[in-house]
Image (cartoon, rainbow, N blue to C red):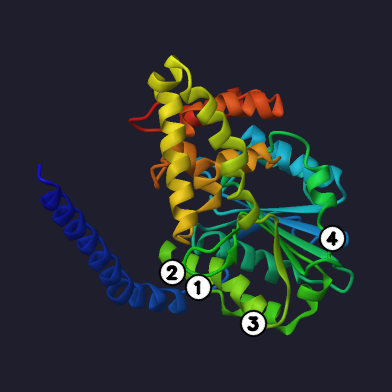
Amino acid sequence: MPPRLVRLLYNLTSGISAFLSSLKWYAIIPVARLVGFLRRRRQIVSAWPERPAPLGPKVVLFMHFDRGGRVRPQIITYLKEFAANGRSVVFVTNSGRLTDPAMAELREICAGVIVRRNVGYDFGAWRDGIEYLGLPRAGTEELILANDSLFGPLRPIGDLLARLDYTETDIWGLTDSWQFRYHLQSFFLAFGPAALQSPAFAKFWASVRPVPAKSYIVRAFEIGVTQAMVKAGLRCEALWPYEKVIRLVDAEVMMKITELDETAIGKLDPVVITRKLHALRVRSAAARRIALNPAADLWRQLMLSGFPFIKRELLRENPTGVEDVGDWMEVVQDVFGADPLPILRDLKSMMKDKAP
């Protein structure tokens, strides 16, 4: 096919995609917003204990969803890590129910369990938890919002939690993104005393509505919470900041690829080739100041620098077409000495038309 025709088809496809995206935003989103404002905001079905439990000064609201009401073993490990490091954990599920074994296990770990309808995504769940528990309370020093969108932790998180120094910043994330607008990625958000006491915190959560549109939730709430806090004068930082992680492509990837390229097998091995293609894509984006999704595009660099998780969506669907994720099991083993089998077990129940 002639190069000009290839470019024409590419531009046409890109234009159609952009048009459909705009159509969705300007035609469908207003309807979804109206539904969100007409719905009642609280979607709680039940709570244990029946009255909000006593909580310590450091609280975790952990959001979960599973169609069958089950809780994965890795989530139990994650919750135990929080509890072992002095956090009062409140589990908020959007599943509408929990199995009896899951509920029994959660009661051994958590200060509270809230069961709600699958309405409003993560932010709807967190909003319900904040309102129901009356957070922040007089003695609340820290509130961590976390969810089940990650595989892991692949090692204990005590050191990670010890890095949450609120004299350095007011709100911590694990990673940050510059896509659309700057924001902390919402699978882990830690609010310190200054943020919790700010009127901007209460104002933001009062604005959260159960809008049935994920794209709206991402822009208005995932990106919106960071933007609202920044505009209120609060400091937001990531433990693994984007500008540092993206530089690791040079140090950790390109040098190894160059060494392998000098060998015959390096020139032929598809794994090496895909790593090179991905590294070049990342470097090209950095050179052109195109924002990437660190949890997906920089997964390898994150793990090499100690990030003890891998995004579930990356392994399950790989929606952004990350080229070099095929050897994730080797990275899990080599970097953390961790067993990839628990992740493989979960992938067996969720993957379609792909191999792990």
Q: Which mark is residue 216?
A: 2
Mark 4 or mark 1: whose residue is earlier in sequence: 4
* Three-letter amino acid code at the position of disc 2: Tyr
Up-down: is 294 above or below 170? above
Residue 125 percent coordinates (x, y): 59, 61
* Three-letter amino acid code at the position of disc 3: Lys
* Three-letter amino acid code at the position of disc 1: Ala
Disc 4 crowd rating (10 Å Cα; few below 14, some 14-19, many 20+) is few
How far apart, in angstroms, are the residues tagged by discs 3 and 4? 21 Å
The label nearer to you, 3 versus 2, is 3
Indicate the secondary structure of the residue bearing disc 2: helix
Residue 259 sits in which quadrant? top right
Judging by the rendered image, the residue that carries numbered circle 4 is 165
How far apart, in angstroms, are the residues tagged by discs 3 and 2? 20 Å
Q: In the image as oriented, which residue stretches furthest toward the top?
A: 264
Q: Are marks 1 and 3 in contact (CB under 8 Å)?
A: no
Image quarter in which the N terminus is found: top left
Judging by the rendered image, the residue that carries numbered circle 1 is 220
Residue 285 percent coordinates (x, y): 45, 54
